[in-house]
Amino acid sequence: MTVKFGLLGAGRIGKVHAKAVTGDAGAQLVAVADAFPAAAQAIADQYGCEVRSIEAILAAKDIDAVVICTPTDTHADLIEQFVKAGKAVFCEKPIDLSLARVKACLEVVRANKGTLMVGFNRRFDPHFKAVRAEIDKGTIGTPEMVVITSRDPGAPPVDYIKRSGGIFRDMTIHDFDMARFLLGEEITEVVATAAVLVDPAIGKAGDFDSVQVMLKTKSGRQAMISNSRRATYGYDQRIEVHGSLGAVSAENQRPVSIEVATAAGYTRPPLHDFFMTRYTEAYAAEIATFIAALSGKGKAEPSGEDGLIALALADAAVKSVAEGRVVKMSEIL
Amino acid sequence: MTVKFGLLGAGRIGKVHAKAVTGDAGAQLVAVADAFPAAAQAIADQYGCEVRSIEAILAAKDIDAVVICTPTDTHADLIEQFVKAGKAVFCEKPIDLSLARVKACLEVVRANKGTLMVGFNRRFDPHFKAVRAEIDKGTIGTPEMVVITSRDPGAPPVDYIKRSGGIFRDMTIHDFDMARFLLGEEITEVVATAAVLVDPAIGKAGDFDSVQVMLKTKSGRQAMISNSRRATYGYDQRIEVHGSLGAVSAENQRPVSIEVATAAGYTRPPLHDFFMTRYTEAYAAEIATFIAALSGKGKAEPSGEDGLIALALADAAVKSVAEGRVVKMSEIL
Amino acid sequence: MTVKFGLLGAGRIGKVHAKAVTGDAGAQLVAVADAFPAAAQAIADQYGCEVRSIEAILAAKDIDAVVICTPTDTHADLIEQFVKAGKAVFCEKPIDLSLARVKACLEVVRANKGTLMVGFNRRFDPHFKAVRAEIDKGTIGTPEMVVITSRDPGAPPVDYIKRSGGIFRDMTIHDFDMARFLLGEEITEVVATAAVLVDPAIGKAGDFDSVQVMLKTKSGRQAMISNSRRATYGYDQRIEVHGSLGAVSAENQRPVSIEVATAAGYTRPPLHDFFMTRYTEAYAAEIATFIAALSGKGKAEPSGEDGLIALALADAAVKSVAEGRVVKMSEIL
Amino acid sequence: MTVKFGLLGAGRIGKVHAKAVTGDAGAQLVAVADAFPAAAQAIADQYGCEVRSIEAILAAKDIDAVVICTPTDTHADLIEQFVKAGKAVFCEKPIDLSLARVKACLEVVRANKGTLMVGFNRRFDPHFKAVRAEIDKGTIGTPEMVVITSRDPGAPPVDYIKRSGGIFRDMTIHDFDMARFLLGEEITEVVATAAVLVDPAIGKAGDFDSVQVMLKTKSGRQAMISNSRRATYGYDQRIEVHGSLGAVSAENQRPVSIEVATAAGYTRPPLHDFFMTRYTEAYAAEIATFIAALSGKGKAEPSGEDGLIALALADAAVKSVAEGRVVKMSEIL
């Protein structure tokens, strides 16, 4: 069976998903839609598919599934429309910046018995996935203490910051999902500290650029997250999990792994400087997982519910900073 | 000038300091005292010094300085007595488990213009010291985010736990001092999470064995600490500091650095399994610093004030866990 | 300009090159030929090209260049035919196992002003390429001592060994080319030691499975190569270059870079277990270089001459083992 | 039992051994001799022993053993005298630069049933020792291919070079002994290449500064050595052993193990810059082994025979370079 795809959004991330869909033997890219016809046409030319309107893709009989890469504020509406139309949906994170809107959207998905997978691509990074596999194998016993370091090479433009929902919902949300992926138990408490150290303009926009979060589960498993919007040395993405029998960690990735030794010391090159080159394999693997799930192999996870919980954790972090206290997840969800 | 030393306490850590004092060209070990005469005699035999009572050392004209390695509950009294007697004092941490007692003791030190250095040995570890040196050189710009990982190979006996003052005052206190050493700015806020995951008996004794702490300074610099009383892989002691221009970190240390490659992968040996082998060089270097300071070179730091603040941070962490909120240091000190 | 390709040989390596050609925006795969029609058809189906005979490709007007992936003993003949037909040729190494035959073939290439690139893919590995780039930048000064470690996960079948020309011409040949690539000066002396340690059947077939080679250039730059047909820990591929101002090295590569810490130590997974996964990027990059060269950007190198010299070095190593002495390259070429 | 020591030679290495002897609970340093009385006196003052003449030490009844750290050309004579006088002898390498002289000396040792240990200190480096321990445990199966990298931070003065016996007898000799230590089988063939790349004055003195050696044992086990008299990045000392079941290696050592990450990459400090700081632990451990052996625990190895064979390997390397061929050890010994 070949899964026939429509692609909604032909921007930066849309191109990544177009490549993943066309590169998968189990899928075919049938059509692409974008508000900018030229962007859609470029993908159509490269991969030999059609340019259609979103409405046409919604109505199309030759399309089984869509990948939503449109602006965030359109996600929830599109999910609802396409699920109602019987299409399986892969949606870039986040579903929405409003917890209430996400809940309503997931209600529609459930009512229509729809398939919704959310793009937390990092779960599919081969290194992070291997960390989880070791936990599942029992190598480290019960996971007890998770440490996640996640730093961007540089801050995005303030215009982006303003629409982003804030650092916890935009950036830390990936780490919240990763913490859940690794802790193996639902998080019950959240506490965060936050500061503006990188760019005062981010502070003026009401956001932070340097934050820390601690998480705790019911049985006492704990996680820490360290985030910064700046890292001169590249895209810093590390995870480690300490457990009752041992620990497992994933190192940073760099484009080339050479080492130069001189009188100044031993130097390895900086890390990847961009999330798309860092997570190239992860993007392909998440789409492959979605396609496989639609073909009956495995699950279309992370689910809409996973998207909801990650957003709720971000909301809890926002509340924690505002009130200077530990926030229980039962206050949020 | 040769500094003439008395050693108070001939236990495990007393032996370490005896070796450090006798191995330093600027010092001489004149006498040792211990409640167990045999322990004192063993050191006297090995290093050719006398066994005396504490009172005799207090009164001795041939002794300039003492190293206090007696049980914790005697520290503050001994500091006061020896400072009054005009001796310089190096005291193992902590000065006392009660903040009020420490304050009173430091008052006496000040009133007598005494010299008091506190044994936060980790500042003298060559690797951690080199981390600090890079910060001082400006290599990483302004320090912004500190991450400290500190895990013991195994939990101490519950009897020890009961007298320890709890994990924050006994174990995390080293990391509090390290965070201050690295942040370069006084800490103003503390928040902690805590759990019992290693040994239920520790919980019964009213303590925790797995804790996390977040710290924040006035300008927004932040630190995270991850502590566990258990690590199958050895004594896990890592620090990293992320700053505006870069980052600097100190790796774990192991007795031998070989690597074995087989079909099962590439394996390096476990870490040191004991704090004394891990921090061998640090113990010698802190005593050397004390001796040098008494000879007019450099300062006798960390000071009693440093000991006070680290304890206050521990108290804040205890309060934070109890009340589920961020505790301001202005509430404690 | 789009370079139109014919692919000769649809086996394991043919598939790799088919993917590289079709994935390059500057090229089009027009036709594929193979002695086994089903193999050719599979590639034709996957990439939408035609199955043709070698003769048809030779005569075709819609084909500019060919990639030769047929058995070794056909390489020289095919190169001559296609060069005479005015096609640019990319040929898998080696051109031939006989030095005389290679010389004759290159004579034909020269006489026809043909373009011939030889598949020493390792030069295009991003890590090894970065090593060379550091040398070119002058980071390490003059290269003086090269150390190449190259070990296969396991020995090939003895049937393959018999046809291979022996370990120096089959396996070490890559390292000879790499040594030339890194030394920056022509090799003038070769000496080798060899043994059968892995499989006595290899010895019975007249070959070795564990060999060492030392190389020297006119000015005294030196290189060492360590080869084994067996490595339980994976495909061991390392290079290092020591120079007057420093050194540069490329580490081994593994599919996932995690580390597991337990009481048994710190373990990273084994290396890649197959040359095709190890050198995935190198295969794509060498074809991209060929395509670019045909489009006027850069050179189609390594050349036929590079192939000749690498084979001559292998011949010198064979002679060195037989005669127990240093062999001068002037004796061979 | 306490072993009573005389120290012959109070230079740089004499001081190292004085510290090792006095730091060992099983030994006592009774006397020190040196052609420069001030040098001997300095050691006597520091460790509380006597200054005596060599003749007095030879005749002394209160001395059981000597450590010989005098100039190389006195070693063989002193060994013979002290062995005849019934003293156990630890002698710095080499016994002599002439193979004939060494053989004659060992004859005297044997005839007198003397104890002679030779200072190949690297066998006692904890990391290299751990490599050997893994081999002995069988972790890597049969050792097959050894790679030794050994580079000095800088070349010694030409005056030293002239008296040194040449790079193979002065520097590579340590690697010859290490290769024997790791191969577990006697070496039967030697071949070397050599060049002058660092300093033309070394060439004028008839020596080389950049050399490579390959070794082979009877069963076909092989080793490679890469030596240079220059390494800007520090004292480069690595070994690796590839075997039938795996491999084991020892990494380089540096004074502090921090890592600095900036836009320029990830940098660790240079290596140790001096053999005495690199091998601090090895020097203490070899003397401890000698003392233990004299007290009936373990063997006084490496023996005089080990010193003889290492020198013979150096002679073979010299011959190999001169004649451009593989030299069989049966030609030398």
Image (cartoon, coloured by chain):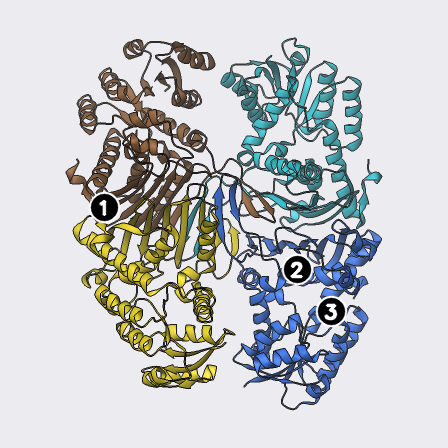
Chain colours: A blue, B cyan, C yellow, D brown
Residue linked to disc 3 = A308
Q: Amino acid at mark 2?
A: Ala
Evaluate whether label 1 is on the same chain as label 3: no
The chain ID associated with circle 2 is A
Q: Are marks 1 and 3 in contact (CB under 8 Å)?
A: no
- Residue B140: x and y, percent? 65, 43
- Residue C173: x and y, percent? 31, 60
Spatial CA distance of label 1 from label 3 is 67 Å
Residue B321 falls left or right of residue C123: right
Residue D208 falls left or right of residue A27: left
> Which quarter of the image is occupied by the C terminus of chain B?
top right
Q: Residues within 10 Å of mark 1 (few under 14, many from 20)?
A: many
Q: Nearer the viewer, mark 1 or mark 2?
A: 1
- Residue A134: x and y, percent? 53, 60
Res D198 label: none
Residue linked to disc 2 = A179
Quarter-of-image position of residue D41: top left
- Residue A176: x and y, percent? 69, 61
- In the image shown, does B190 or C291 lie closer to the viewer? C291
The chain ID associated with circle 1 is D
Residue C276 falls left or right of residue C163: right
Q: Is residue A114 visible?
A: yes
Residue A282 falls left or right of residue B217: left
Quarter-of-image position of residue D23: top left
Q: Amino acid at mark 1?
A: Thr
Q: Are marks 1 and 2 in contact (CB under 8 Å)?
A: no
Give the SS element for disc 3: helix
Spatial CA distance of label 3 from label 2 is 14 Å
Res D217 label: 1
Q: Is residue C158 visible?
A: no
> Which quarter of the image is occupied by the N terminus of chain B?
top right
